[in-house]
Image (tube, helix red, strand yellow):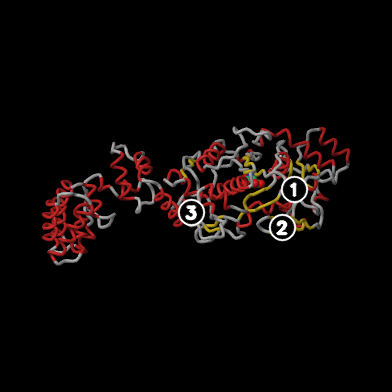
Amino acid sequence: MPQKPVRVRFAPSPTGPLHMGGVRTALYNYLFAKKNNGTFIIRVEDTDQTRFVPEAQDYIMDAMNWCGIMPTEGPGLGGDFGPYVQSERKEMYRPYAEQLVNDDKAYYAFDTAEELEKMREQAKQMGMPNWQYNSVTRSSLKNSLTLPQTEVERLLAEGTQYVIRMKMPRNKDIRFHDLIRGWVVVNTNNLDDKVLFKSDGMPTYHLANIVDDYLMQISHVIRGEEWLPSAPLHVMLYEAFGWDAPEFAHLPLLLRPDGNGKLSKRDGDRLGFPVFPTDWTTAEGELYSGYREKGYFKGAFINMLALLGWNPGTTQEIFNLDELVEAFSLERVSKAGAKFDPDKTKWFQQQYLRAHSDDELATLLAKHTDKSYSHETLKSVCHLMKERATFVQDMLVDGAYLFERPASYDKETIKKKWKTETFELVQDWLEEVKSIATFDATTIEVTFKAYLEKKQVGIGAVLLPFRLSVTGVGAGPGMFDIAAFLGKDEVVTRIEIGLEAIQAIVNEA
Ligand code: GLU
């Protein structure tokens, strides 16, 4: 049998920004499509008008664009299966719901919200807190299965509000295969008669999702584990329509760093890491931070996300997008929840930063300062600082002394490490510095070593004091490189100023 072309969709509901977990779902869909020469589609599932957030769709598209995982069919992207926003497909769904009623797979239910609430309340008082509209209770409720045909027709003709519910068969095992979880079996006695079509004339998620997956010829449904409980109903719907169901793959949850529960949108800023791909400000003006604005490279973000729930089966950790496409398979996605690791995320960012050339980093760094440093200067700064930085902008802060003389000196380190004889040693070293003819890192180092030899002191006795007086801080990139970068005159002046400032600190102690 010829294989069906691979068509996968990411189907977000525009109820807010796209959480990291949603980006991972989109990413896996993208990778799977590319790997199998398939098509990646975005469909906006906005049937729940009460939770609709107008800016969400733009946010989602922008975030996917930043990540470099744009679909090729979707709103504003074209494709032969549109429209790709469910509210624009509104008229399409009712006939499908009615078809199910005609085929005795679904029914009209006229119960009002108040009546249902009353039922729930009564059940609760009788010790049944989880009352459901299901294959048992429906026989005593107000629907087209219990009311005479003429009454149903009268109610419909009068325009009485109704919903269409799925007629779940009693005691039937629903079996389906999940590419990640294997065989899943659920008995229909555990399922209720879900609403398929609402009184506001809109389909529910379930109906619209199945109708659209069918009409858009979706071959594989790759989505979060939270949809697994809905899958049996979806399988029943495909069966009821007489359609072949797509393959299913339910992705593992993203868990909090401590493994306790699902990663939620509030966890991020509370625990100090972003949960969203890009910044999101709520209508109330509350800001949720995003990876892009924090300064993460999209490659690092995507690389980290790809490995949250999938593994390549090798020890390789760094993958660009093309390499991910090449290596990806659903078989290597795990069932178990994936713990998000903020430190590892930073590690990925560091690796990506280091992989950039000094030239590229200098161009990026220029965007973080309004001072007009030359490209060459910034290149040297990047060369010096990139092994120690996580984000591009860190280099301006941590390497501030490369641009300006220190405004302060690290008192803690001075108190711990600066001895009385240190002044004289640095003073003498200053005289040596003045005499260096070619002020490059190698010559400075050779001169420094000879000086230590002459003085019969260890490297620690002068190197840290030299660093403190020039940079004001106790750690940083190679001191001879820093000195060469600053130039002889500047180093001489800095040692002079530094010695005075440090003397004042020592006196004060
Ligand atoms: N609209 C659903 C969501 O918000 C889509 C679930 C699915 O992919 O079937 O995640």
- Count residues near mark 3 (Cα–Cα under 10 Å), then give few for <14, some for 14-19, many for 20+: some
- Classify the position of the C terminus by image quarter: bottom left
On the image, the x and y values in percent for residue 285 come to: 46, 40
> In the visual, does 53 lie left or right of 141?
left
Q: Indicate whether 255 appears above or below 357.
A: below
Q: Residue at x 79, y 51 (%)?
A: 168
On the image, the x and y values in percent for residue 146 come to: 85, 46
Residue kind at label 2, given as amino acid type: Gln
Q: Residue at x 14, y 49 (%)?
A: 437
Residue kind at label 3, given as amino acid type: Ile
> In the visual, does 471 lie left or right of 340?
left
- Count residues near mark 1 (Cα–Cα under 10 Å), then give few for <14, some for 14-19, many for 20+: many
State the residue position of label 2: 125
State the residue in front, 54 or 175: 175
State the residue position of label 3: 318
On the image, the x and y values in percent for residue 398 come to: 30, 50
Element type at marker 1? loop
Real-space Cα separation, disc 1 to disc 2, in angstroms: 41 Å
Real-space Cα separation, disc 2 to disc 3, in angstroms: 58 Å
Circle nearer the N terminus (2, 3): 2
State the residue position of label 1: 245
> In the visual, does 394 lie left or right of 53?
left
